[in-house]
Amino acid sequence: MTTTAVQDTRRLLAWLGAGLLAGGMPVHEVEEDVQEAATALGHESIEVAASPTGLWVALTSGDAATFEAVDGGVRLDQLAEVTAVHTALTSGLLDPADALARLAVLRQHPHRYPAYGLPLGLFLIGTGVALVLAPAWSSVVFAALLSQVVAGLMMLSGRTLLVGTLMPFLAAFASAFAAFGAAEVGLVDAPLWTLVPPIAVLLPGALIVTGLTELSAGSMVAGTSRLAYGATQLLLATLGVGAAVAALGVPLSRITGERPDELGLWAPLLGLLFIAAGISLLESVPPSLVPALLVTIVATVIAQELGRATGQGAWLGAFLGACAASLVATLVEFVRPRVPRVVAFLPSFWLLVPGSLGLVSVAQIESSPAAGVVAAAEVLVIVVAIALGVIVGAGLARPLRDVARRLNPVRRRVARQLAERASRRPRRPRGQEGPTQ
């Protein structure tokens, strides 16, 4: 290979890995996917080392290496594009130059719902989480209203560095101030649970579980850094709740873990529909993929509830739910090759992780240290169970993924269509910014 071809190959693999990292995938899975793509390109002795903020790629040991930084996340539709490029590359149906051109313009893909995706998506997610987490009419109305405040803060965070840095604190302060203020005049019951749904999308539960998954898989640096960052985000949110309590002079007796439950069994089911639709709007997911996301979400919740019904505790439900999310996402990819496994899995993963429970538990420490510590310990057990479930589910799903790659003709046809579509796209001049900038 010429020097230019070698550089382009390293750049392609680095951009591919950076796109997967930006989508929130664990580093050990990213390294496996990059190595698989490199093998398909004829480089079996590749060296790759990933972290949550970037990765290094060398085609052989001792060779020159390329580093690609990750600057912010990508939406689910952009992550689907990255996984589609990976599928076409590993199937041998996409030219490396065309793959490089597609990844070069990844960040330029416009949002499918630019005008209303963020506010309406947060509205549906907030009300959906309220129907699942705090099923009471007052909590649902509160989540619907406050979700728009959070939407405004998220828009402002993209323009102001200070707001972006303090986003968990500011959102938690606004939600807690409104919840405890409404509780003082009798408009809201259980304010500690009511304040959570509007800010659920900002809580770092998925980040913490991903960190534990990476630690369990041996990625010590990545797992430790994610846990530290997630704990910091959770602490900022807790400080926001504490600041609102102090500003209002709320009695400590109001900070209780009592959970509202006024609505029937229909509320969580409707909440799941709202959450799936909200994630699709927020993450620019095409409407044709929404049923696949909903199938995975429903299967995850059913497995979770079956585990809880055994009476063994919430940890078993969390473990079974995580296993089901991995397995069903793989089956969905087998049946619908246009739906990448990771895109079907992540919404269920976000629904599983108890970031909201962590915030409630830590906030309870302010009023009742003993009860708060016990609740926090229970949440820790659930988080560990989810991490183990993700690992076990991924291990059980690996044979299914191999079978899908070898035997599914639809998958190969889709990869061929993606390759043909990529060949018709204009290439971006070499040297311009890549997918993480």
Image: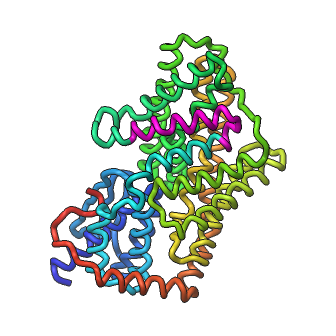
**Along the horizontal axis of the image, is 168 left or right of 137?**
left
Q: Give percent across and percent down for residue 59.
A: 29, 73
User: Vertically, is 41 above or below 233?
Assistant: below
What colouring does the structure picture have? rainbow
Query: Observer-nearest residue: 430 or 285?
Result: 285
Query: Observer-nearest residue: 39 or 437?
Result: 437
Q: Give percent across and percent down for residue 263.
A: 76, 39
**In the rendered structure, which segment of residues is drawn in magenta?**
131-154
Residue 27 seen in render: no
Quadrant position of residue 198: top right
User: Vertically, is 11 above or below 235?
Assistant: below
Is 142 included in the stretch rendered in magenta?
Answer: yes
Where the N terminus falls, by quadrant?
Answer: bottom left
Where the C terminus falls, by quadrant?
Answer: bottom left
Is 355 included in the stretch rendered in magenta?
Answer: no
Which residue shows up at 21% across the image and 62% down it?
433
Which residue shows up at 49% across the image and 30% down it?
172
Q: Give percent across and percent down for residue 388.
A: 63, 53
Query: Observer-nearest residue: 60 or 248?
Result: 248
Which residue shows up at 56% across the image and 48% down it?
124
**Along the horizontal axis of the image, is 7 left or right of 57?**
left
Q: Give percent across and percent down for residue 354.
A: 61, 42
Q: How many marks?
A: 0
Q: Main secondary structure of the magenta part?
A: helix
Which residue shows up at 44% across the image and 67% down it?
80
